[in-house]
């Protein structure tokens, strides 16, 4: 019996929902949002594109629960024991879904995989920078470089920077492993581009956090959405100008 792409896709969606229910990675609203975004990316893109988003979701959940009790005692842990809601899902998965829709409307011109990978790289870079960085007290403002309290919006630390590079690199490697046939030729160059965009997007998130979120002009999820949207746009621009 031949296993079709649609069969794999449905299995991934059902598997994702099952894992999220068991691990409580997402609450009820998050499950609904993840299902909608998963269907858009999977059916209008490819199942490997959805697999990359699932890789991010599971990795982010692991990072969130890493030393959760310690982070919770410090006041830096995600609420609801790390279970994420629909706002968080849209903030990190909305831009990739929109990129897929535009890619499909434009006749699947080839840039979709790079745009999605770059957007997810931003999300992973920011997640690991936050979840790992809060364990480092050597925090400075990304704009003024003055010392600021740990966990501050716009704060950066050596450990957080390491996390941001690691997160972007993880997505780049996963994208090459899962989506090589959909990405431009020159996979090493492509991996460098994804990693670079992911890291830059994380820094943009920090700048927006300090300038806009701290002043109440934007919320956390809006900042995340703008940063991941930058990732998708930068991935498209890289495809158009380099490849």
Image (spheres, rainbow, N blue to C red):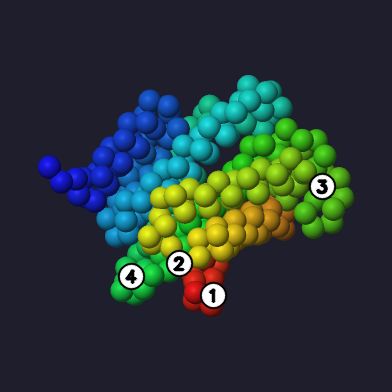
The label on residue 140 is 3
Q: Residues within 10 Å of mark 4 (few under 14, many from 20)?
A: some
Instruction: State the image coordinates of residue 66 (x, y, percent, origin top left).
Output: 60, 28
Instruction: State the image coordinates of residue 20 (x, y, percent, origin top left).
Output: 39, 32
Q: Quadrant of residue 159?
A: top right
Q: Disc 4 vs disc 1: which is toward the camera?
A: 1
Q: Disc 1 vs disc 3: which is toward the camera?
A: 1
- First in sequence: mark 3 or mark 2? 3
Q: Secondary structure at mark 3?
A: strand
Measuring 50% from the left and 65% from the top, which residue is drawn there?
186
Residue 80 horizontal side relative to residue 125, left or right: left
Give the total of numbered labels. Answer: 4
Q: Quadrant of residue 137?
A: top right
Pointer 4 residue = 108
- First in sequence: mark 1 or mark 2? 2
Q: Residues within 10 Å of mark 1 (few under 14, many from 20)?
A: few
Distance from the alpha carbon under mark 1 to that under mark 3: 35 Å
- First in sequence: mark 1 or mark 3? 3
């Amino acid at each position: 019996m031949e296993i079709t792409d649609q069969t794999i896709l449905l299995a991934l969606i059902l598997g994702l929902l099952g894992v999220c229910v068991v691990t409580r990675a997402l609450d009820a609203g998050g499950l609904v949002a993840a299902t909608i975004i998963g269907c858009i990316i999977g059916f209008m893109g490819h199942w490997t594109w959805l697999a990359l988003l699932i890789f991010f979701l599971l990795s982010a959940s692991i990072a969130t629960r890493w030393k959760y009790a310690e982070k919770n005692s410090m006041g830096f842990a995600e609420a609801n024991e790390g279970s994420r809601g629909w706002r968080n899902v849209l903030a990190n998965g909305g831009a990739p879904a929109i990129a897929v829709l535009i890619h499909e409307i434009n006749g699947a011109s080839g840039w979709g995989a790079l745009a999605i990978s770059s957007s997810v790289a931003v999300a992973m870079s920011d997640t690991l920078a936050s979840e790992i960085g809060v364990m480092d007290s050597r925090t400075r403002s990304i704009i003024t470089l003055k010392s600021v309290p740990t966990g501050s919006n716009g704060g950066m630390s050596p450990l957080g920077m390491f996390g941001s590079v690691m997160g972007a690199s993880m997505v780049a490697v996963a994208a090459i492993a899962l989506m090589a046939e959909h990405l431009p030729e020159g996979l090493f160059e492509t991996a460098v581009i994804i990693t670079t965009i992911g890291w830059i997007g994380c820094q943009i998130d920090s700048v927006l956090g300090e300038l806009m979120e701290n002043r109440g002009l934007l919320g956390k999820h809006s900042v995340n959405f703008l940063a991941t949207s930058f990732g998708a746009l930068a991935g498209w621009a890289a495809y158009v100008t380099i490849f």
